[in-house]
Amino acid sequence: MTQTSTSDVTPDTAETQPTGTEPTETVMETVVNIGPSHPSTHGVCRVVVHLDGEVITHCEPIIGHLHRGIEKMAENRTYLQVVPLTDRLDYVGSMYANWAYCRAVERLAGIRVPERAEYIRVIVCELQRIASHMMGIGSTGADTGAFTAFMYTFAQREKVVELFELLCGARLTYNYVRPGGVSRDLPDGWVEQCRAFTAQHPSAMLEIDDLLLGNVIARARLKGVGVLTQVDAVAWGTSGPIARGSGVDWDLRRDDPYSVYPRFDFSVPLGDNGDSYDRARVRVWECVESCRIINQALDQLEPGSVQAEGLPRLLAPRPGDAYDHIESARGSLGVYLVSDGSPRLYRMKVRSPAFCNLAVLPLLAKGHTLSDLVVILGSLDPVFGEVDR
Amino acid sequence: MTLLWGFLWGVASVATIAGGAILGVWWERKVSARIQMRYGPQQIGPYGSLQMIADVPKLLFKEDIVPDLADKAVFKLAPLFVFGPVATSMVVIPFAAGWAPVDMSVGILFFLAVPSIEVIAILLSAWASHNTLSTIGGLRATAQMISYEIPRSLAVLSVVLLAGSLRPLDVLSAWQWWWAPLTFVGFVIYFIASIAEMNRGPFDIPEADSELVAGYFADYSGMRWASFMMAEYGSMIAASLFGAVVFFGGGWPLSGAAGVVLLVIKTVLIMTAVMWVKWTFPRPRQDQLMSFCWKVLTPLALLQLVIVGAVLPWL
């Protein structure tokens, strides 16, 4: 690590200089490595930060520390064997990757999913959205030093994780959504537990909102920090709460309706200023909206099969390709599949919202202080399993 | 003889801080756990009170890591210089009327001034670590601790004005119950500025764990790390004790041994408030903290001083 250097002394510094800015004699720059192992990089991200005093002149996220080659590994596996791999993409929201992949497979192979399975998928994915946002909001707290807020959100997340544990036995990597449906039906009493959760969750969200986002210091830390304009949000391809925080009214659940979402009444919360505060706020209200969706889905849930009938053990779709996307907690998550007619995938490509959202970090962090960098990074809520894949 | 007594009081002060830190860590774990809907330690001893007995040997047996590029002599000595001033400042605090370990005519000035030396030690430890994050932490600590000296001293000055003396024993004997409401704003300023002085949350910006990992002591381990920890708890204990004496009249209304017990209770209450604040609030940014110091706390402390000055001729 370079202690303090003028920009042209060490080769390491010169290498990471932003292109187009000639280093001048008078600027004393400090180069700081945030990460790859750091309390607020939310995984393993390395951010090379060029500081003038404490003000960021340039920063660059260096990704790939968690690269496991999941897209390549998928090429050696059958269609069903890829589902556990997708669990490891966005490990805070495994259900989404499961579902996005399964939708692409279903589109490729022309599988019709039973209605009950679609409802269950919607329910678990909305629960997953809550669990994921609890992580996002909580880490906004932890990044600003409000660790208690983190514990409060994790208490809520824990309740969701317990529901998932009842459902499939796993707490993090569920492997629950499968091509053609879901792996098993809801266990006895699960619906009642889920209703109990959605009944208390909105009030818990209000409490967390009050504790964290209502706090005068938190507001000072979050408001006006990392402003992403609506134009930039679209231009950089952001999606999810990051785009909606900037006022981009785009939600795949409503704008490219899939599954049974058209049957539900819900609204899409939007931010005004596109700062870290608005992004956190959008997440809070999305959790409340998710509760509404879950309640409606539980009301409309009818008995029936949860797996498509007559599905072969070994899927071998006809040659061709398919793309499908869903609205994950981080934005539009797309999966592109190519089949060559064999039982193994020919190619998988994941359009990862966390990756696209992370790209705006240098744009947002410039001119802010080091303290703001962790807040901005936290407000983008990246999950590096999905960024690096 | 004086030297011997001085030595003994020094040892007593260190022992008080060490013992207080052990109890303080347990208490903080319990308080923070309750705030965060947890139980905290409960396995070792009643209510987990012997947890620190398990933790201290762990710290003792840890490897003493000194980074290769560190300025080794300074790196090794800095923790002592962080802890020393805090322990030194403790000795002037009076525990009961007519009884202070060291009776000093400028005791209050001494208490406010000596812990400031800690800043230099923190800067040394930060610089010697040869770590960018540590350096940033050390510089933040310097700016913060020097700035917060001013509202803190001004707040205490209002009580000094009322007592007409810088001798802590005189302040204690002259203390009247109505001073507490009169100087309440001063106490709040003292409370906030003390938190900034001891680098505790929410003003733990120099060691901000989410930004600088641990700031100036990021590279320390084992007992050297523990002496930073002890210094932090030591200044919390000292500041709470001093606040209880100056702003709440020590053992008032009791006297003698009962008064000392009451003083300890008041101190624990102030310490609990310090913990409560830490585990509730997020951390402000450095520039926000500095502008809060200079634009809010310092004018308020001056206003408090003016109010006390206006009341004084009517006494």
Image: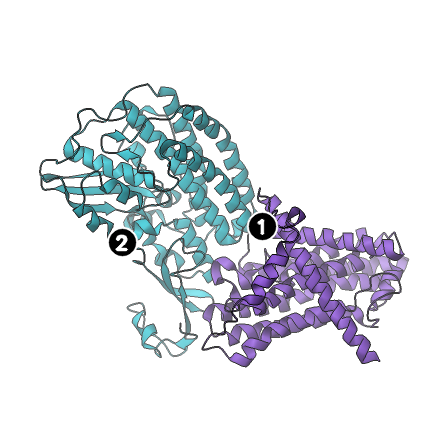
Chain colours: A cyan, B purple
**Horizontal arrangement in the rendering, residue A224 relative to residue B148 (left or right):** left
Report the residue that reaches farthest toward the top: A303
Disc 1 sits on a residue from what chain? B
User: In this figure, which residue is indicated by the disc labeled 1?
Assistant: B281
Q: Amino acid at mark 1?
A: Phe
**Which residue type does callout 2 highlight?**
Arg
Q: Position of residue A35 (x, y in %)?
A: 40, 61
Both marks 1 and 2 on one chain: no
* Quadrant (top left/top right/bottom left/bottom right) for the N terminus of chain A: bottom left
Locate residue A250, reporting x and y percent.
Answer: 32, 38
Q: Nearer the viewer, mark 1 or mark 2?
A: 2
**Disc 1/disc 2 C-alpha distance (Å):** 38 Å
Expressed as whole percent of the image width and height from the top left, the position of residue A56 reads 42, 64
Residue B14 in the figure: left or right of residue A342: right
Query: Which residue is pictured at 59% across the width and 75% down the height?
Result: B78
> What chain does mark 2 sit on?
A
- Residue at point 68%, 72% (across, down): B85
**Nearer the observer, A316 or B157:** A316
Residue A165, relative to residue A228: is it above or below? above
Q: Are marks 1 and 2 in contact (CB under 8 Å)?
A: no
Q: Which quarter of the picture shows residue B243?
A: bottom right
Can residue A213 be seen here? The reply is no
Category of crowding for the residue at label 2, using alpha-carbon neighbours closer than 10 angstroms: few (below 14), some (14–19), many (at least 20): some
Total number of numbered labels? 2
Circle 2: element type: loop
As helix, strand or loop, the secondary structure at mark 1 comes to loop
